[in-house]
Image (tube, rainbow, N blue to C red):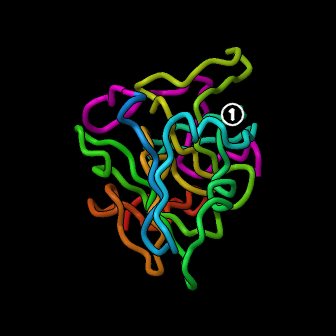
Amino acid sequence: MGNRLPPGQFETEKWPILHQGDVYEFNEATWDFRLFGEVKEEISLSYEEIMKLPKTVSTVDMHCVTTWSKFATTFEGIAFRDLMKIVAINENVKYVKIYGYYNGDRFGYSANLPLDALLGDDALFVYRWKDQNHEWQDITPKHGYPLRFIPPATFYLWKGTKWASGIRFMKEDEAGFWEELGYSMTANPFKEERYR
């Protein structure tokens, strides 16, 4: 599916900056990442602990609901599946909400996703990137530093939570930030699932 342009999209080599609310100011001393919800035991990881987890490098395509698509951006980060290895989830968990900072609230932003779609190399909590025009560099605060979720290309990019702060495991699907405002729950760009 690489380099396949979904309907209604145009290709760009730039990585446009779009965000809602204030840009989060990272403070390593107070930042942590929480795994909670339908789990046997909640886990909270410091920035140091997150950065000690195995790293994955993956090249992905990004598709924004505002109609731009950027092909072949390479990211380094922690694969969603590697976070799954450190938490014991309850039976019948089929969905997650990935949270991020929004105007000072660490759980103010969220995006809902089906769990089974996030177990490959293309679902990453990223901290640096490169492409054909850029060498490796940290993602900027406006792009979600210190940790941003990049979803598989089968989801519009609003599912890619900036300033990621945690994962809530769920048995039932539940609308996230943009979904509550009328955006699609499933958000497949190849089916133009932009709105409900």
Left or right position of 130 against 95: right
Q: Quadrant of residue 59?
A: top right
Q: Quadrant of residue 150?
A: top right
Q: Main secondary structure of the magenta part?
A: loop
- Secondary structure state at the residue bearing disc 1: strand
Where residue 135 sits: x, y (%)? Answer: 70, 14
Q: Is residue 176 above or below residue 95?
A: above
Report the label total: 1
10 or 183, nearer to the observer: 183
Q: Position of residue 16 (x, y in %)?
A: 48, 27
Q: Amino acid at mark 1?
A: Glu
Does 110 sit left or right of 143 as displayed? left
Any part of residue 153 in sight? no
- The quarter of the picture where residue 74 lies is top right
- Looking at the picture, tell me which residue is in the foreground, 51 or 191: 51
Q: Can residue 154 be seen by looking at this rendering?
A: yes
Relative to 136, 50 lies left or right: left
Quadrant occupied by the C terminus: bottom left
Q: In the displayed structure, would residue 48 be above or below residue 111?
A: above
Badge 1: how crowded within 10 Å, few (<14), some, or many (20+)?
many
Left or right, residue 12 beside residue 39? right
Where is residue 137 drawn, in percent x and y? 62, 18
Looking at the image, residue 50 lies above or below residue 88: above
Percent across and percent down for residue 72 are 72, 34
| Residue at x 63% of width, y 59% of height | 86
Q: Which residues are magenta?
A: 1-27
**Which residue matches tag 1?**
76
> Which residue is painted at 42% across and 24% down in the image?
141
In the rendered image, the residue lying farthest to the bottom is: 92
